Amino acid sequence: MSFCCGASMLGTKGTLKHYRTQVHNVPLLFCPVCHRVEVHYKVENEYEILAEYAHSDGVSEIDFQDFIMEDDDSIFGNCVNREDEDPLVIVQSQIDISLDLLSVAKQIGDEKWEDELKKRLAVMSRRRARLQHNNR
């Protein structure tokens, strides 16, 4: 499980550009609050090698899925949520996790962490309200 902004990142797949080469279907971790994206740590080395070889061969596009042996469940098995889930369920899960962590931050007296979690909760609460409004 990877963390950003005080709670967990979502597992997803996407396209990354490595110089002039687009690498499709790369397993990624995505922060729903600050939108930070990083290559999933389980395939980070494979991504770097494939992207470098593709770039040096002058390939403009390549599908990462064609070169990886692991399936999505084994890659994303440690993610709390995946992007293909219901957005409202994801947001509620992220809020619950952040509230649990806020309790811990208060218990240990970490004010900086508390502030980060409160900011995250504000963002996620606004997102939940928008999703609920759109579902009506």
Image: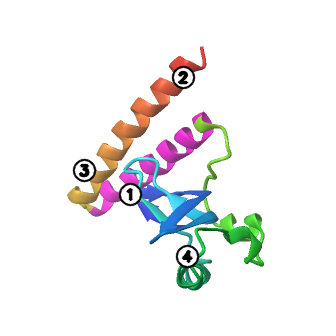
Which of the 4 image quadrants contains residue 69? bottom right
Q: Quickly name the residue at label 4.
A: 41
Depth check, mark 2 against mark 4: the one in front is 4
Whichever of labels 3 and 1 marks the residue nearer the N terminus, that label is 1
Q: Are marks 4 and 3 in contact (CB under 8 Å)?
A: no
Q: Is residue 136 left or right of residue 98?
A: right
The segment highlighted magenta reads 88-108
Query: Which residue is depicted at the point 61% across and 81% down?
Result: 50
| Residue on which the image places disc 2 | 132
Depth check, front residue: 52 or 35:
52
- Tell me whether circle 4 and circle 1 mark residues in contact (CB < 8 Å): no
Between discs 2 and 3, the one toward the N terminus: 3
Q: Secondary structure at mark 2?
A: helix
Residue hosting label 3: 115
Classify mark 1: helix, strand or loop: loop
Disc nearest the viewer among 4 and 3: 4
